[in-house]
Image (cartoon, rainbow, N blue to C red):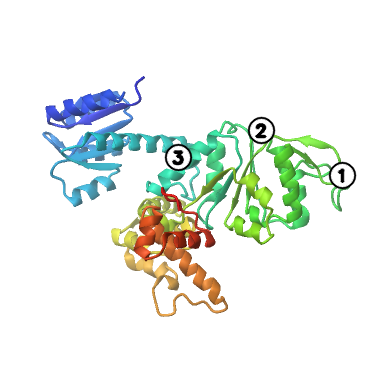
Amino acid sequence: MLRAHLLIVDDEPAILTTLQRALALEGYAVDVAGGVRIASEKLKKHQYDLCLFDVALPDGDGLSLLQSVRASKNDVPVIMMSGHATIDVAVQATRLGALNFLEKPLNTDALLIAVETALRLDRALAEASALRAQAGSGALVGTSAAMQRLQEQITRAARSSANVLITGERGTGKELVARAIHELSPRAKGPMEKLNCAALPSELIESELFGHEVGAFTGATKQRRGRFERASGGTIFLDEIGDMPMAAQAKLLRVLQEREIERVGGSETVKVDARVVAASNKNLVRAADAGLFRADLYDRLNVVPLELPPLRARRQDVPQLAAHFLELAARANDRRGVVMSPEAVEVLAGYSFPGNVRELRNLIERLVILTPDDGIDADDVRNCLPESATPRPGGLFRPGVPFRVLAEEAERTILSEAVAHHGGQMTATARALDLERSHLYKKCKALGLREKDDEAP
């Protein structure tokens, strides 16, 4: 069975033959073109799953072809190839939307890996299209390795019926990921109920979750169905689950075990069929050790764990996120002509964003509103960044915050950025920091950083 339909554009017949044969052996359907004109005609007639463009062509160049493809609203993934390319050309290709840039002479194994990776990423992005339509938070915008892994994890999690626990710092987009899991799941046609466990007083949360009978408490003048009943056949999203009162935790555990609820003030059991997706920015393992969260409930929720990366661990996504938010903010504030300079984007990419994607979105909207001209430059960005973004003596000190907390925050930031810099490889990270690998593992665990290595600790 043919796996995907590809188009290769190159002016060297021998290369076209070699690539076509290699890809056909892997099951791909492959069309070829020797120049821009023929390629343009084929692109008008066929819907391709992936294109490979050479930069130098007899009747134009691959970059112009890529630009025209994007101008025609064709979002087909494109890999560029060249035997005489400079860094500037590679950067320009990336800015025009190329997913990868391969140098000639091509290594067949490297080519096949690049093609498979590009197709896999495109499938993941397509499967998340329902989420992208409402991706105002931008949590899933980006093509970094961390985001590719997250997209794949979301897709796999969505296909199962298991409970999911989403963890990550504030502002990383946990609710958006929960919505994606629901929209991509077999339950997508069912309802999705969401409840912020930190937003309700303890005496009301059980009524919200399980409903109540008439007379259950003062003001309960009629029977009310809770979120679990309303979510039957669909998904219930429990945000900030770490703030749920212990009494409600015990009842939630029973629901997860028995798949039935009792309304507050009632004795009749009601069967429910709702998949649970929970989220927390707290370290629930540490909370369980401290007796603040039920360990057995954690085990029930943590069947499929998803940890969202902080923005500082995927800085290469900042330019794409900034462009995404700039377009949204410009449209919302009637400033469609506003643009951001490359230098301004560099300043953004150098900031740590403790508030993560949410902070970036708010910052971009602030810039769109407050910048009087149509061009946002580096100084505009610096003026909008918090004072703490500028390094200064004593910059880590905050009055009233204990030393232990400040030191822990500094260690967490250093280790998180170091692990991200080394692609999640703990051995390389330990070597760079001159730490014993076992000590690094213990530190990461103590700080709630659950980075993984291919090797056993």
Instruction: Return the x and y of residue 114 as percentages of the image width and height.
Output: 29, 38
For the point 27% across and 23% down, which residue is it? 25
Between marks 3 and 2, how big is the CA–CA gap? 24 Å
Kind of element beneath mark 2: loop
Between marks 1 and 3, how big is the CA–CA gap? 46 Å
On residue 187, which mark appears?
Answer: none
Q: Quadrant of residue 126?
A: top left
- Image vertical order of residue 148 relative to residue 190, above or below: below
Q: Residues within 10 Å of mark 3 (few under 14, many from 20)?
A: some
Q: Residues within 10 Å of mark 1 (few under 14, many from 20)?
A: some
Residue that mark 1 sits on: 214
Give the left or right position of residue 194, taking residue 366 as reference.
Answer: right
Q: Amino acid at mark 1?
A: Val
Q: Is residue 457 visible?
A: yes
Give the left or right position of residue 420, taking residue 80 as reference.
Answer: right
On residue 152, which mark appears?
Answer: 3
